């Protein structure tokens, strides 16, 4: 049987100790990883590449329709005048009756979220909905509010709120469930991306070395950042250029059941589970904290988890072959999700339950997550975007618990990483750099590249073994399942050994990944 050894500047991944630079391939399988000197005397065809060898990457959390959002990009807007001009220009470009959707707005840069009156100055004859870059907060003009039935005396929806002026009249700023209420009303007037665009966007990711994505998909008729029914987009775009694990966003058990059948009937898609929400975002003051925001002492955010409904959907996700994956950013939301998962464990429900984002966690919460065998699905690039305001939001003491990636690893947590695109760009190098350099946040919580890269290649496991964990193998996965990549890590400005991982006090409790 023919053998081939491939030597690079180094190997990053499972089975690769410091100094490893060579993989040995036999019969289409990676059978060994080590130093070139260790393969002396082994009969093999030899080749050398100028780069680091690595397994394909996994973006564990993104929104596929958001890769090709329709509407006007507002990420670079720094003043009200520019905002008005962009929205007015978009309205002039669109056919009559089509809603104007803006996305990516940075309210820190703009100096606050626009009100309905400010949006009316830009466009008054059709609905306008402008999303903050997190997607959890938005601003609507008067036409959009009227279309959604938002009157001066409207009550806040469960799990959301309307900002109001001193008289109680909605200002146009929407938070959490209020965003969905207005977005659903605008959906017929805001055509989304088409399947061909989604296919091309995923092909671009594959070209970056991404082999699998965790796709958080909507299935209703609402509009989120200009996106409609993402599940149907994926189905119609199949076959896809990479593996797609689908997590369905819904609050209804029958919708989840139908969506799972739809996924499993589509080649190239795999049902990952149910995606739920426990809170919002730190930037929008809607992430649920255990004590008030440092810069908004009047609020602790919005805790939107319905434990009974979430338990029913979590059980069904496991029954259908997936796992629950619940968005929780603030420490109060993380605690609520851990409590939910603890109750499910007590009822005998197994699986690699996920906490999406897990952004603010102290040692106690991390220990509880480890003890329950939970998967923490983190987005290191949030540190890039949040560093300008994070200490203001959390205060000088609590900010030390923001994105505690190193502490998670040291305490034995299982991590997967993702971009949360379109909230952050689906850029592999950007994610790795954020994990290692921390971008202005405490370097004490930086991950070594030897930890950051495996977290970027880890797959979420299906139920099996204690708490859904399965053993991993150092060698032997098929090349067809795990193509090796030539990874130019020096584009990051550091080598893979420049930042060393601190010791893990509980090495038997941590999980590795497989190629």
Image: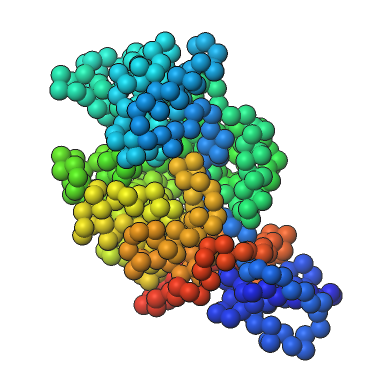
Farthest residue, direction right: 1
Q: Nearer the viewer, residue 493 or 269?
A: 493
In this picture, is 493 found above or below 249?
Answer: below
Farthest residue, direction bottom: 41
Q: Nearer the viewer, residue 96 or 478?
A: 96
- Residue at 24%, 48% (x, y): give it: 393
Q: Is residue 140 visible?
A: yes
- Residue at 45%, 25% (x, y): give it: 86
Image side of residue 351 versus residue 207, left or right: left
Color style of the picture: rainbow
- Residue at 21%, 60% (x, y): give it: 397
Image side of residue 256 versus residue 167, left or right: right
- Residue at 44%, 61% (x, y): give it: 435
Q: Is residue 467 visible?
A: no
Q: Nearer the viewer, residue 205 or 232?
A: 205
Measuring from the top left, give residue 199's x and y in whole percent.
66, 38
Measuring from the top left, give residue 479's x and y in whole percent.
72, 64
Image side of residue 294 versus residue 35, left or right: left
Image side of residue 50 versus residue 183, left or right: right
Q: Nearer the viewer, residue 70 or 410?
A: 70
Number of labels in the image equals 0
Measuring from the top left, give residue 264's x and y in whole percent.
62, 41
In this picture, is 67 found above or below 508?
Answer: above
**Residue 17 picture quarter:** bottom right
Identify the image quadrant of the C terminus.
bottom right
Identify the image quadrant of the N terminus.
bottom right
Measuring from the top left, give residue 499's x and y in whole percent.
45, 73
**Residue 123 picture quarter:** top left
């Amino acid at each position: 049987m023919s053998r081939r050894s491939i030597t690079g500047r180094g190997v990053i991944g499972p089975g690769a100790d410091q100094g490893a630079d060579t993989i040995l391939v036999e019969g289409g399988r990676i059978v060994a990883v080590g130093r070139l000197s260790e393969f002396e005397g082994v009969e093999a065809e030899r080749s050398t590449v100028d780069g680091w060898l690595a397994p394909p990457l996994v973006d564990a959390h993104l929104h596929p329709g958001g890769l090709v959002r329709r509407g006007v990009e507002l990420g670079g807007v720094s003043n009200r005048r520019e905002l008005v001009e962009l929205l007015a220009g978009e309205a002039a470009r669109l056919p009559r009756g089509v809603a104007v959707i803006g996305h990516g707005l940075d309210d820190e840069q703009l100096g606050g979220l626009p009100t309905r009156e400010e949006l009316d100055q830009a466009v008054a004859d059709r609905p306008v909905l402008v999303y903050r870059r997190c997607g959890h907060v938005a601003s609507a003009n008067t036409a959009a509010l009227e279309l959604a039935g938002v009157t001066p005396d409207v009550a806040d929806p469960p799990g959301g709120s309307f900002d109001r002026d001193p008289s109680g009249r909605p200002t146009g700023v929407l938070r959490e469930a209020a965003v969905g209420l207005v977005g659903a009303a605008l959906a017929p007037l805001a055509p989304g991306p088409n399947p061909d665009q989604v296919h091309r966007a995923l092909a671009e990711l594959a070209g970056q070395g991404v082999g699998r994505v965790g796709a958080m998909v909507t299935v209703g008729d609402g509009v989120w950042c200009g996106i409609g029914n993402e599940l149907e987009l994926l189905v119609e775009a199949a076959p896809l250029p990479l593996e797609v694990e689908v997590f369905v966003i819904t609050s209804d058990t029958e919708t989840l059941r139908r969506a799972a059948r739809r996924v499993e009937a589509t080649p190239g898609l795999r049902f990952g589970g149910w995606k739920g929400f426990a809170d919002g975002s730190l930037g929008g003051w809607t992430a649920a904290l255990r004590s008030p925001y440092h810069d908004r002492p009047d609020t602790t955010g919005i805790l939107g988890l319905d434990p009974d409904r979430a338990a029913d959907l979590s059980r069904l996700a496991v029954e259908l072959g997936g796992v629950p994956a619940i968005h929780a950013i603030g420490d109060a939301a993380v605690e609520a999700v851990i409590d939910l998962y603890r109750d499910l464990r007590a009822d005998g429900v197994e699986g690699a339950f996920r906490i999406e984002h897990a952004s603010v966690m102290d040692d106690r919460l991390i220990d509880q997550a480890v003890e329950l065998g939970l998967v923490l699905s983190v987005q290191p690039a949030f540190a890039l975007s949040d560093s300008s305001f994070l200490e203001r939001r959390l205060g000088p003491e609590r900010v030390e618990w923001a994105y505690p990636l190193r502490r998670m690893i040291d305490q034995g947590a299982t991590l997967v990483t993702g971009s949360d695109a379109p909230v952050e760009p689906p850029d592999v190098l950007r994610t790795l750099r954020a994990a290692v350099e921390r971008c202005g946040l405490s370097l004490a919580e930086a991950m070594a590249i030897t930890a950051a890269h495996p977290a970027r290649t880890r797959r979420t496991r299906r139920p099996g073994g204690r708490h859904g964990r399965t053993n991993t193998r150092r060698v032997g996965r098929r090349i067809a399942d795990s193509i090796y990549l030539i990874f130019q890590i020096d584009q990051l400005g550091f080598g893979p050994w420049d930042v060393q991982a601190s010791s893990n006090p509980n090495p038997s409790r941590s999980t590795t990944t497989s190629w």
